[in-house]
Image (cartoon, helix red, strand yellow):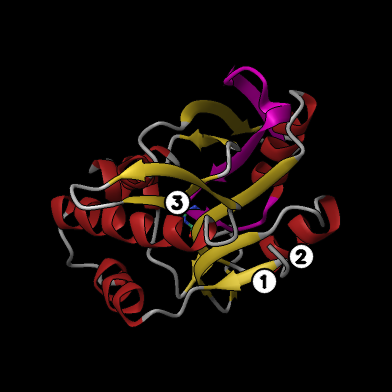
Amino acid sequence: MKDHLTIVKHPMIQHKLTLMREKTTSTAVFGQLLREISQLLTYEATRDLPLTTRSIETPLLQMDAPCLAGRKLALVSILRAGNGMLEGMRDIIPSARVGFVGLYRDEETLMPVQYYQKLPDHLEDRCVIAVDPMLATGNSSAAAIDLIKKAGAKDIRFLCLLAAPEGVETMKKAHPDVPIITASLDDRLNDVGYILPGLGDAGDRMFGTK
Ligand code: URA
């Protein structure tokens, strides 16, 4: 992907996102909309994957038909909210290997600390799509990408539902080689790190917690 930031302004995505932002949207509807938007964002995030052809036979003729050119894919969910986008991504790429990275924020240093990591093998040969719905400060996303790079990945893209300018800046400084695909670049963060106007706590809204 050429651009560091791609905002997917497709009308279906924007409409669904508006429904998700509304505070009265139920957990069930929120989850379904997130799955649908994740499918559509995945479609955009894979737009530049190289194609080759293979010879197939239709019921009528032989043809050289397009197919993905061998590059294996991996999806990496940044826990826990990343899991809400995984289902929709796997609807589109069911054969992708899936990994998980867990980070929490140390309340004293405010820096992300890793508590879990399980990644597919041979990441160096894969196109990796890391996912976290909310790119807020960008600190945990940048730390997750550090871990994914340490595990060998070279071709990484980052998928999120909403991004704040602060998070985009953090990612651009830490990982200028990792393109970001999002449905919206919102206005800013509030003083406790929530995206404005945002949609609240994505994990709480998708899992019905508080
Ligand atoms: N994480 C969320 O779930 N929401 C925000 O607004 C920021 C970070």
Q: Nearer the viewer, mark 2 or mark 3?
A: 3
Read off the residue under disc 3: 64
Where is residue 25 drawn, in percent x and y?
18, 64
Indicate whether 111 appears above or below 201.
Answer: above
Q: Residue at x 30, y 55 (%)?
A: 34
Q: CA distance from mark 2 to mark 1?
A: 6 Å
Where is residue 121 drawn, in percent x and y?
62, 17
Read off the residue under disc 2: 169
Judge the density around disc 1: few (<14), some (14-19), many (≥20) Cα neighbours within 10 Å. Answer: some
**Magenta region includes residue 122:** yes
Give the amino acid type for the residue marked by disc 2 in the picture.
Glu
Q: CA distance from mark 3 to mark 1?
A: 45 Å
For residue 172, what is the image quadrant? bottom right
Q: Does the residue at mark 3 contact the one at mark 1 (Cβ under 8 Å)?
A: no
- For the record, the magenta segment spans 112-138
User: In the displayed structure, does residue 92 sit left or right of residue 60?
Assistant: right
Read off the residue under disc 1: 165
Say which element carries label 2.
helix
Judge the density around disc 2: few (<14), some (14-19), many (≥20) Cα neighbours within 10 Å. Answer: some
Where is residue 81 drawn, in percent x and y?
42, 42
Question: Which quadrant: the C terminus?
Answer: top left
Q: Is residue 144 visible?
A: yes
Q: Is residue 111 visible?
A: no
Give the amino acid type for the residue marked by disc 1 in the picture.
Pro
Give the amino acid type for the residue marked by disc 3 in the picture.
Asp
Say which element carries label 3.
strand
